[in-house]
Amino acid sequence: MPETTTITTATTPPAATATNAATAPTILVIDDDPEIRYSLSRVLSSRNYAILEASSGEQGIAIVKKNPPALVFLDVRMGGMSGIEALQHIRSANPRQMVILMTAFGTAQTAIEAMKYGAFDYIMKPFDPQKVLTLAETALKAHADIRAASNYKPTLNINNEDYKEGIVGASQPMQDVFKIIGQVTASDVTVMITGESGTGKELVARSIWKHSHRAAKPFIAVNCAAIPENLIESELFGHEKGSFTGATNQRIGKFELCDNGTIFLDEIGDMALATQTKILRVLQQGEIQRVGGTETIKVNVRILAATNKDLETMLREKTFREDLYYRLNVVRIRMPALRERPDDIPQLVDYCLQNLVRQKKARVQKVSPEAMAVLTRHRWPGNVRELENLIYRSAIIAQGDTILLKDLPEEIRGQKTEAREQKQEIQKPDIQTSPPVSDSTFTLETALDYLHENLSNTDEPLLHRLEREMIMRTLKSESGNLARASEKLGITRATLRKRMDEYGLK
């Protein structure tokens, strides 16, 4: 039986002109109740949309197949084919078709099936004219975004040999990482990989291993933060039967299993001092002892380590051994945070989407320009890991093959990014031509004042701006003397020169 609930109509609008009908978006109303079709058509005509009507699901499907409209309003309960059936046929004929279901029965089943089969949204009867118009406008905006994404060209192809290791990025910070990886693969030098959580430190470790002469031997990754302190020695070095309660059998540790291979000690900053001592022994003498054992076992293992902690601070606090630090920190690779390389975000998005398609977890292959702009502006405190999870979530939510702005989480869409709406070119200041500063001493108070005054000036990370300003003021206070400036800043002269090059300071 057809639904008999009538629509509340707005003031009678003028009929759409022929010109408007030719240029305005077309909306198809499918309902077997003529009063619903008439009333809904009058409300939508108030915005000069071109309106088509169909009295059954079969008739509506034929119209969509012949000339797809921008938007379809589809009743759920009709005589003959149901709205849910019609929705499946319509989306099968045109996977990008925007469909809004109409129902007087707001059951969980209706809502779940509507979204399951790709409806853009659904609306309850009786209708509020303003809600109808707002929803239509939102759907038409999504339709326009999908059309805008029709020329979307992926920035990479994950089947390319260049991306087999999963490290993605063409920015200068990533190019610097690639260079160091290439330089350390030919030797057995220990490498310390630092960077925030989620930046891809393990990917770098695996890349070093794959390109080294140990590539045919084992690679074992150990997350030091995930293993309880009382078990980590047994995990790394093994134990003898009966060495502690629960040790019913002899166990071979990771170092023995990894003989002639490469071991990756992730989050080594979380390792207890007692265990650090034993790691130092492996590095110095190439030998271990199982827990509860007396036999000395020789091992030939290359050690790669990683942490997101400030090891220099831990040295001062005596929570990390200084001798182990210098043994591990022979070569250091710093993984840049994602906010430091926003130009890599489109590539990373493409990599994530193509991976999801290959794993058959999603069908989405594109991102609308508006959504990509928001992704590029986001600060990504969780770095690449956060981006991967967000893209997976958005690909599941998205209808069709395109992630739209509406598919992104509210916390991403709702950010206050007005000040960054127009991307500004970051001007690297010349210390000789920069505006004079009133006080060359850079105290906490002046730092906070500077940030407050310059918070939205550019897209450059706050830490970079603050560091550059601090260097500028210190150089000015020391009349450009690098020795005195580096001493005042607490860094080496070589580091100061490097920072000056990075920020374009003379």
Image (cartoon, rainbow, N blue to C red):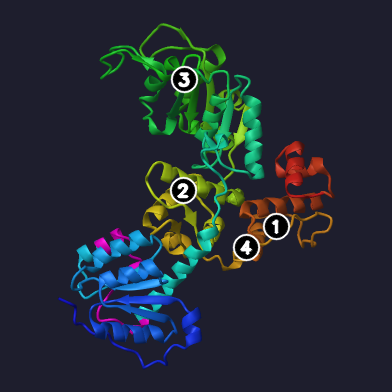
Element at badge 2?
A: helix
Element at badge 4?
A: loop
Above-or-below relation of 203 to 188: below
The answer to whether 145 appears left or right of 336 in the picture is: left
Instruction: Residue type at mark 1: give it.
Output: Ile
| Mark toward the viewer: 1 or 4 | 1
Q: Nearer the viewer, residue 308 or 370?
A: 370
Mark number displayed over residue 426: 1
Residues at discs 3 and 2 in contact (Cβ within 8 Å):
no
Instruction: Residue type at mark 2: give it.
Output: Leu
According to the picture, the residue beneath numbered tag 3 turns out to be 218
Mark number displayed over residue 455: 4
For the question of whether residue 487 can be seen, the reply is no
Which of the 4 quarters of the picture holds residue 2? bottom left
Q: Residues under labels 4 and 3: Cα distance? A: 48 Å
- Sequence-wise first label, 1 or 2: 2
Instruction: Residue type at mark 4: give it.
Output: Leu
The stretch of residues the image draws in magenta is: 113-130
- Sequence-wise first label, 2 or 4: 2
Magenta residue check for 177: no
According to the picture, the residue beneath numbered tag 2 turns out to be 353
Element at badge 3?
A: loop
